[in-house]
Amino acid sequence: MNDAKLTLNIHLESVETRMDELLQKAAILQQQDPEQALILVSRITELATEDKLVYYLSAAQKIRGNVHFLQSEYDLAKECYFSALVHAKKADDARLTGDIHYNLGRVFTKLKDFPAALEHLQHSLTFRRKLSERKDESSSLTHIGQVYWEMQDFQQSVLYFQKAAEVCDSSLSARQIAIIYNNLGNSCIKINDIPRALEAYLYSLKLKETFGNATDLGTAQLNLGNLYYTTTEYVLALSYYLEAGRLYGVAQDAAKEAIVYSNLGATYTALKDLDQAAVYHQKALAYFQRNGTKEDHAKSLNNIGTIYQHKAEYQKAIATYEESLGLKSTFYNAESLAITYHNLSECHYGLGEYHAALDNTQKSMSYSNQIMSKSLLLKSYIVLSKIYAALNDFQNAYEVLDVHRLLDLEVYNTQKTTVLTEMMVHYDAEGKAKEIQMLKTGQHALEELFEKQVKDKIRYLRLYRSKLDEVKKRVAAQEKLEQLNAELESKIQHALQDYSAQQQIIIQKSKLESLGVMAAGMAHEINQPLSAISMGLNNMRIKAQRSELSEAYLDDKIRKLTDDIQRIRSVIEHVRQFSRDQVNSNPEKIDIQQTLRDAVALIAYDLAKHQIKLRMLHSEHTLSTVGSKFKLEQVFLNLIANARDAILEKIHTEGLARGEYLIEIKSCRQADYAEIVFYDNGIGVPGTSLNKIFDPFYTTKSPEKGTGLGLSISYGIILEMGGKITVHSEPKMHTTITVTLPILEEQK
């Protein structure tokens, strides 16, 4: 039995040795000769299946997945990696399991499934932390940082690149460490941590000088140029970009040269040398149109649009920006979209197209909020306030400027108390640590330290001065902003006063229109008592001629004549009160049903003249509310007059004889509200007009019959009283308008 076990072990050792050789060859060939690599993987799988060697089954599937990944066949790669993961878990091998989770993280990153990518990369990190070497752990941390970069969560990106840098040890090459620090610098720029970015870039450059070729050194120069461009030191940025372009030229790297052209164009634009900027942007665009990605092509178009914008050639700029957006619609980059929409809004503003400018600004702010970019939001708030001011919407303009002021103050305080302070403290603490370390190594090292610190001091001083200049500019801008706030506040007050006066004029105009409608009804109301007075006086004259005037007769006649005169006075007083300007009237307790009866009395004669039946159904409860009695009466008159016009139009358009045409008014109490319903069986409201009937100046009537103010004013009055007004209509059938008003607390 021992001999059989020994024979089996020898056999397994032989098989494993063979498979190790095959795995090594397949790993080498997976990129150079994928077909041969897959043949070897199939052989490994056969051998491992025979002896149930799960480790080798997993390793073979991992290499198969690698081949598909290198050929951009990501779905096939994913299937292979998941199969490999099942066997790796059975083999209980931390390194292999960590590698497969890492590869799955890379696949999901390519598929833009970032949550799944982060999940597998975190699993890979868990397994790789169990290993003695830190190379694989640093690789997982770096890729997590890259996923957050893709997601444009730059704070998390900085966090993981920093962790990757902290676990670097001798198992990593200088090139790998340089890449980590380069990525850290890029992310720090995105969160405006300039000192930390500078430190990361300089360390990366120092490493690249030990191994790097022209392309590596060019990238280091390009990054330093980006840093100084961010701090608005454009002349210094220019020198680094030119050196990067020279190094890429030596390396014959046309793609990187095109990136440098783009950055040179942006720098010359900032320096106001637009012609030189256009030359470099056109060079970049020519390359990216032929060979670049859609992202690079779209960015170049955006840059050329900026040149047109600076030259105030807004139509050309808009056309170029929209072409850029067309490309950006095929991929997603919130920051890039925010910038282009912001540029579009400024161009439309320059052309006086304020609504288009407003639309684009709101889109820009939406994307800026997604990436929490305060710098882009500050720019958008400035444009937004100018747009509102141009539209005479001073209230919104003032509010936007106030939001800008608070955000600007927040950014300013953060930079003042955090960025500058941390920069100097960080430098001093690090410098002291280096001094202590270098003092131990002798005089020569101390001299080198001194020389380096002098250079670093100058570099940090330059950054510090740049920040101070930026702070001064911000303070000046803040003072100007406060002045603009004061001016806008004054304009808002004047505008609100003008608006209030105009509203009152419109209401008065509507009242006069209502009085015109009521003229016949008022004449009827006055004619009846006048006729009675005339007849009474005539009877008294006849009685006097006949000497038939008795004291009882005179008392009765005088009382009736006095009542008729009082009735006329009441009508005149009612009209006078109704037509009076109610701007300064105080709220009062209103009997809703009595107000309704007063309104009906003024228009009932007109309805009768047109043979329109009026039916009123009053609530048995007293319905009281608070407001202006005559304004509410105006609402009721407008609604009844509209119902009358709808019936007359139906008679006219359908050519029907007058028949059972009806206006029904019903008042009742519903919980805490009084409800007044106006129904008519007139022409109705077309469906396309139903949502517009409360808009000022909108009317379906001919110009001589209506101005479109009645319902708009009625809507405003009811809203002012805390109520609401709704409409339901069936075209050519009927219309129902419902007014609800809050009732007094004492009635509830």
Image: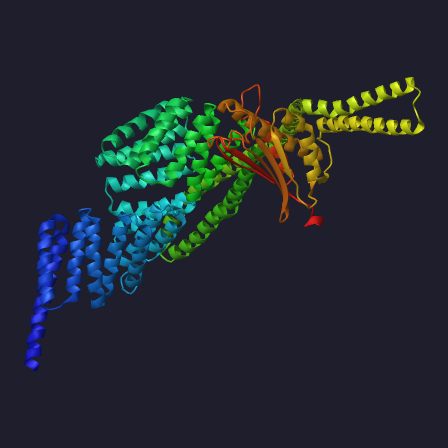
In the displayed structure, 150 sits above or below 101; it is: above
Residue found 24% across the figure and 39% down from its top: 214
In the displayed structure image, the side of residue 364 where residue 76 appears, left or right: left
Tell me if residue 567 comes above or below residue 173 in the rendering.
above
**Residue 701, image x, y percentages:** 54, 23
Q: Is residue 628 shown to the viewer in this render?
A: no
The residue that appears at 42% across and 53% down in the rendered structure is 430
Q: Quadrant of residue 235?
A: top left
Quadrant of the snapshot with the N terminus? bottom left
Question: Residue shown at 25%/40% (left/top)?
Answer: 215
Q: Which residue is more in the foreground, 368 or 540?
A: 540
- Which is nearer the eye, 191 or 577? 577
Left-right relation of 7 to 455: left
- Image side of residue 677 versus residue 81, left or right: right
Q: Position of residue 728 (x, y in %)?
A: 52, 37
Instruction: Please provide percent x and percent y for residue 230.
Output: 41, 38
Residue 549 at least partly seen: yes
Q: Residue at x 30, y 26 (%)?
A: 282
Q: How is the image coloured?
A: rainbow
The number of numbered badges drawn on the structure is 0
589 sits left or right of 267 in the view: right
